[in-house]
Amino acid sequence: MTTRKAIYRNTAIFGLTLTALAGAPAHANNGDQSDAAETSDNVIIVTAQRREQSIQDVPIAISAFTPKQLDTLAVKKTIDLVDTLPNLVGSNNTSLGSANVYFLRGQGQDESFPTFDPAVGTYVDEIFYARQNGNNIALFDIERTEVLRGPQGTLFGKNTTGGAINVVLRKPGEEFGGFAEVSYGRFDEVTLRGSVDLPLSERVRFLVSGFYVDDNGWLENTALDRNINDRNAYGGRIAIDIDLTDDLNWYVVGDYIRDSGTNITGRDINLDTDAATGPIRTSGNYGDVDLVSTSILPLGLDAVFPGAVSKADYGSLTKSYNTSSNLTYQMDNGSISLIMGYRKVENDFLVNFPLPQFDAFMQFPSPANPALDDIFIIDNIGDFKQYSAELKYNGSLFDDFLNLTAGLFYLKEENRSDFAAYFAGPTPSRDRIISNDTENIAGYIQGDFALSDQITATAGVRYTDEKKDFRISDNRPIGDITDLTTANMIALGIPIDQREKVWTPRFALQFEPDDDLMFYASATRGFRSGGWNARVNTASGLQPFGSEKVWSYEAGTRLNFGRDFSIAATAFYLEAKDLQVNTAIAQGVFAIGNAGKLLNTGLEVEAFISPVRNLNLYAALGIMDARYEASEADIAACVPPNGTVSVFDVNCELIEPKRSPDAQVTLGGSYDIEIGDAMISPRGSIRMVSDQEVSTRGVGPADGYVLVNAGIDFKPFGDQLNLAVECSNCFNKRYLVASFGNQDTYFNQPGRWTIRATYKFGGRVN
């Protein structure tokens, strides 16, 4: 392991030297002008501080990508960002293809259950996505994507202790135009995408966009002689941008997405097997294993357990309804915006979790018992609603001495889940209805003070008052104190309400000796909400856990010479207290409590250089030294052989924090070859990640890996038509992304190849 990590570190230094340590896929390159929202000297304009700024002037560790750069990096959905950015790790959640698990700087949440909150927030057009369900957003008609690292507790609020992913969708254009795209790829994947700008007048602009994806699945089911993990998804978006007056603008958006993407795990058919214990988990090169499923659950729950009645159909189906409204009034010294949003997500799934540690006494593998993959089944119907409203002011005051951002924020969540679990039998081991609501009221203010032409001081704070309540009813006719009911929780003295009042300040000092060079240092606090352990088996286990608080300290620099050379580097140290981890509740691996600390020290460098015309190179480096610090209570509670306190291994030795690899390196680029009016543009990237732990209690050690994406674009006559051949994970590298121990493991998506044709017309043509 040490040798491998050393190799990655040396590769990082060598790669960054080759690219002149030049900074960041966050800068637009030659030909990107039409893709970026606005550029100044080829620098993207971002909204990382809730107002438009050149990225060069933002004292935050941020990456921003234009649509062209996302194509170069093979980023089609938000989950693909984890194969690009420094110190960002993640995957689709186990069994749920439309829900993403993100860990940024070692902070994240594995669960998409409604009583657990994420540590990396997702925003679309300034609207917060409170649930992980449905956060795997298709990135095809956007203006830019921003990823902000570190706590964003002042301007973005709760559940951004790791950072925030901010997606800015394209607004309707002032000219008629659009694009249409069709592609075909591995697993018979067919994709259709399109968008059209329809300006109705000088003051009214209209946009319609949509997509459709269908494939035949990538996991072989040998019991049913068919593939599973297939995906059928489609959606549409309508946006209206209206200038009500010269100073008053109203931007309204509505969209609908239906996604049946599933992420079922498969068995490694190359397992070694022991007669006494069954299959033996093997480590090493996961790229050489073959994965199959022997599940008969696709036939229905009654096929596995005759007589059982399911709540949901097989697989995972997510339906998402979103509407938002942004009414902005421009004044001489700033603007006032009223931002309102409504989001409804229905996430129904019937999925299985194989548990091979039980296969020894069930005679694994046995063609006579194809239901071995169906030992543990979850059957769920979920309904999640959120309402948000925000009044935001941005202004420049006192002859630009003070740039002020301030606002009031309100969020209401209403979540309901009808959840059942089956364990090796037709009677549910858990069957309950959960309702949990959240009401969040916050006020924030942040000012940038121009102390001189070169020095700017930033000070801001957010006050959050949040209330949560939890209700539960048991669908099983048990009738005793073990019932999963609200009444039993009260009888056992378990709180069914939580209230949190939190101050999350931010301080920064910025020094700009000239327009091309900036240094900054900052200190920021953030918090993640508490919740309840609603996946346990008895009422006594329905324990609450409290919020997690984080202080992060950064020092960074940005050097920019436009398209030729730029660099962005950040060093950080963070301390997360009352860490939300799987802990000593003795209710299985899904129970969470507050335990000890997470300490993390690291470095992030992003680079961009264009040494000659039409050649664009970039590099990204992430280094982390993450470690747990156990509390005295955890130390006292850990007794070998440990099976409950997750910050320790079986011998009560501290383990490495999960999803926190020591080193990550991304290198890539593109080159435009002009042939008359035509252009050929090869592009590619390589991602190298060191060893890491992907699960709790040290049961998911994963080897490092190297991932390659590549493609070539052909434009026969300008930008109107683009023909592309591309591959993601080109060498079909398979690596571990999650594990429950033994061989119940989850891998990344397999390699894909695609041929694609994109036609632009009207105002979308450069």
Image (cartoon, helix red, strand yellow):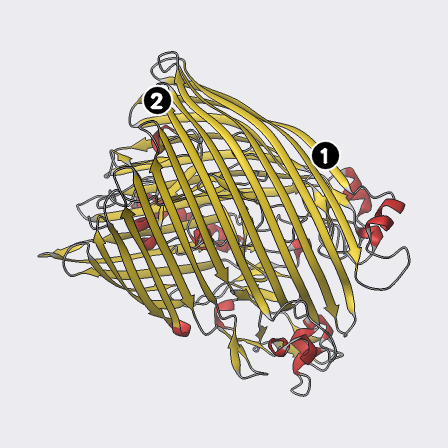
Q: Give the farthest residue toward the left.
A: 676
**Residue shown at the point (57%, 78%) measured from the top left:** 269
Is 512 in front, or is 286? 512
Q: Nearer the viewer, residue 246 or 453?
A: 246
Q: Earlier in the sequence, mark 2 or mark 1?
A: 1
- In the rendered image, residue 595, in percent from the top left (x then y), is placed at 72, 42
- Placement of 684 over or under 421, stated as above or below: above
Residue extending farthest to the bottom is 368
Q: Position of residue 318 (x, y in %)?
A: 55, 60
**Camera-side residue: 443 or 748?**
443
Q: Position of residue 274 (x, y in %)?
A: 69, 78
Residue visible at 47% across and 55% down?
Answer: 256
Q: CA distance from mark 2 to mark 1?
A: 42 Å
Q: Is residue 119 visible?
A: no
Q: Residue at left 80%, top 54%?
A: 586
- Report which quarter residue 551 is drawn in: top right
Q: Label for residue 512?
A: 2
Label 1 environment density (alpha carbons within 10 Å; few <14, some 14–19, many ≥20): some
Q: Is residue 532 visible?
A: yes
Quadrant position of residue 678: bottom left
Q: Which mark is residue 499?
A: 1
Above or below — where is 184 with respect to 597?
Answer: below
Image quadrant occupied by the N terminus: bottom right
